[in-house]
């Protein structure tokens, strides 16, 4: 393939920007500087170096977005015989691992991937990946309660002795519901946070993860992420 296409597929630069890199003498093939914009490379044989760093094609992986309905569990096999998220996926996607969890009655955006490093970075708290949720409560959330969620609330279980503080990075009081933005994914975190400020949740829907939007994807349906979406996610978590 043409060298600019190879550089683009490696995620280093667009084809046009790759042409500039080549013209500036910043690209080597098998140890030789290449300035021919039409130079052909064999990705299985040739070694391409850009600005001193080896250019590698990304490993072929699969990542999908799934709209989890309420009433199914995030597990491969459920001992209670309940429907699982994998019951909605065809055989080709059964080996994918879900990214984080949504509890039984929660619904919304759930990612699946076979890229282990991406999964780690999307779920580990140190990467502070934002998740947005629409939350419907038993009564309108007060501004005071919203501020407490931002400041941090103790969500420890009744029998726990040590504090377990959770907080929302943003809270938006919408007409009829609340939008929460979190950067962690603790077990039943939002339900425990709301209970800590005196509210019960009637419905909970995750609408975005790492800036990926659920959009109008129907409940129980899935789709593979586009190349543009994958690039944005990888850039966000520095993969």
Image (cartoon, rainbow, N blue to C red):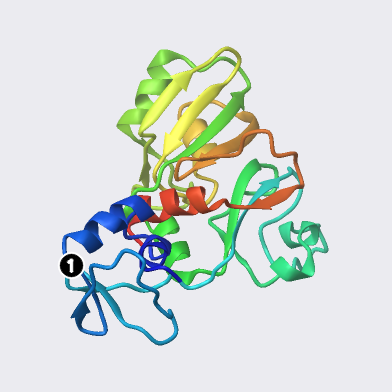
* Residue at mark 1: 51
Tell which of 163 and 236 is nearer to you.
236
Residue 181: give x, y in percent of width and height.
Answer: 43, 34
The answer to whether 167 is drawn above or below residue 14 in the figure is above
The one nearer the camera, 41 or 189, is 41
Quarter of the figure with residue 146:
top left
Of the 4 image quadrants, the one containing the C terminus is: bottom left
Q: Does 21 appear above or below 172?
A: below
Residue 136 lies, in percent from the top left, at 61, 25
Residue 167: percent from left, percent from top: 37, 37
User: Measured from the top left, where is residue 58 in percent x and y?
Assistant: 44, 70
- Helix, strand or loop status at disc 1: loop
Image point 74% across, 62% down: which residue?
A: 86
Looking at the image, residue 178 sits to the left or right of residue 96; the answer is: left
Left or right of 216 in this view: 213: left
**Can residue 229 be seen by looking at this rendering?**
yes
Q: Is any part of residue 126 visible from this angle? A: no
User: At 67% across and 63% down in the image, what residue appears?
Assistant: 75
Q: How many marks?
A: 1
């Amino acid at each position: 393939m043409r060298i600019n296409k190879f550089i683009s597929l490696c995620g280093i630069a667009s084809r046009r920007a790759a042409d500039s890199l080549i013209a500036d003498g910043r690209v080597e093939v098998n140890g030789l500087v290449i300035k021919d914009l039409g130079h052909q490379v064999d990705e299985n044989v040739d070694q391409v170096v850009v600005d001193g760093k080896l250019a590698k094609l990304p490993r072929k992986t699969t990542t999908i977005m799934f709209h989890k309905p309420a009433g199914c569990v995030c597990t491969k096999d459920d001992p209670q015989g309940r429907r699982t998220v994998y019951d909605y996926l065809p055989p080709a996607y059964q080996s994918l691992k879900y990214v984080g969890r949504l509890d039984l009655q929660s619904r919304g955006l759930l990612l699946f991937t076979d890229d282990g490093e991406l999964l780690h970075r999307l779920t580990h708290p140190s990467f502070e990946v934002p998740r947005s949720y629409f939350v419907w409560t038993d009564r309108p959330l007060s501004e005071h309660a919203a501020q407490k969620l931002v400041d941090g609330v103790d969500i420890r279980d009744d029998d726990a002795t040590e504090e377990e503080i959770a907080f929302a990075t943003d809270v938006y009081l919408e007409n009829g519901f609340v939008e929460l933005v979190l950067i962690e994914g603790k077990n039943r975190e939002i339900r425990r946070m709301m209970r800590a400020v005196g509210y019960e949740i009637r419905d909970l829907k995750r609408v975005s993860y790492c800036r990926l939007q659920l959009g109008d994807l129907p409940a129980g349906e899935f789709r593979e992420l586009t190349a543009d979406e994958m690039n944005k996610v990888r850039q966000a978590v520095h993969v």
